[in-house]
Image: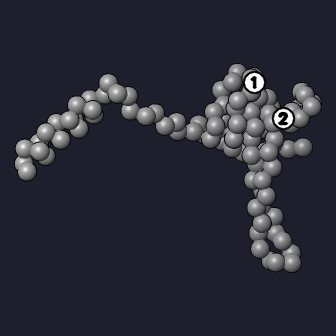
Amino acid sequence: MKSVVGMVVSNKMQKSVVVAVDRLFHHKLYNRYVKRTSKFMAHDENDLCNIGDRVRLDPSRPLSKRKHWVVAEILKKARIYMPPSAGDSGASNTAGMKASASSTS
């Protein structure tokens, strides 16, 4: 087997991730390209992968019933959304905007 590139869709297990790998193939009857997705469980020794990361998987010996891939490298880290905290300066800024809006009317 050769290495594959995919997107991490789940990292809720310890030292394991689920990676979705897309592939395109040409459908002879419809003369179109069809996209198929396969999900592989992979071993992530240091728990570095997050959902949305683009990773390269290398084949390995069977590590468990469904796991026979290892994460070789993280190609691109996902951007993680951080909601603004309540103690931010943005909260006082919106209060000032409300006060100025009420004084103008």
Residue sitting at 38 percent across and 28 percent down?
85
| Three-letter amino acid code at the position of disc 2 | Trp
- Residue 23 occupies quadrant: bottom right
Label 1 SS: loop
Image label count? 2
Crowd around label 1: few <14 · some 14–19 · many ≥20 (10 Å): some
From this view, report whether residue 80 is shown above or below residue 34.
above
Residue sitting at 66 percent across and 31 percent down?
49
Residue under label 1: 15
Q: Is residue 104 visible?
A: yes
Label 2 SS: strand
- Residue 13 occupies quadrant: top right
Image quadrant in which the N terminus is located: top right
- 19 and 13: which is toward the camera: 13
| Three-letter amino acid code at the position of disc 1 | Lys
Marked residue nearer the N-terminal end (2 or 1): 1
Res 26 label = none
The percent position of residue 37, horizontal first and vertical second, equals 78, 53
- 77 and 66: which is toward the camera: 66
- 31 and 58: which is toward the camera: 31
The percent position of residue 16, horizontal first and vertical second, equals 76, 29
Q: Nearer the viewer, mark 2 or mark 1?
A: 1
Colour option used: one colour
Residue sitting at 80 percent across and 33 percent down?
42
Crowd around label 2: few <14 · some 14–19 · many ≥20 (10 Å): many
Residue under label 2: 69
| Alpha-carbon span between mark 2 and mark 1 | 12 Å
- Residue 56 occupies quadrant: top right
The percent position of residue 75, horizontal first and vertical second, equals 64, 39
The percent position of residue 89, horizontal first and vertical second, equals 26, 29
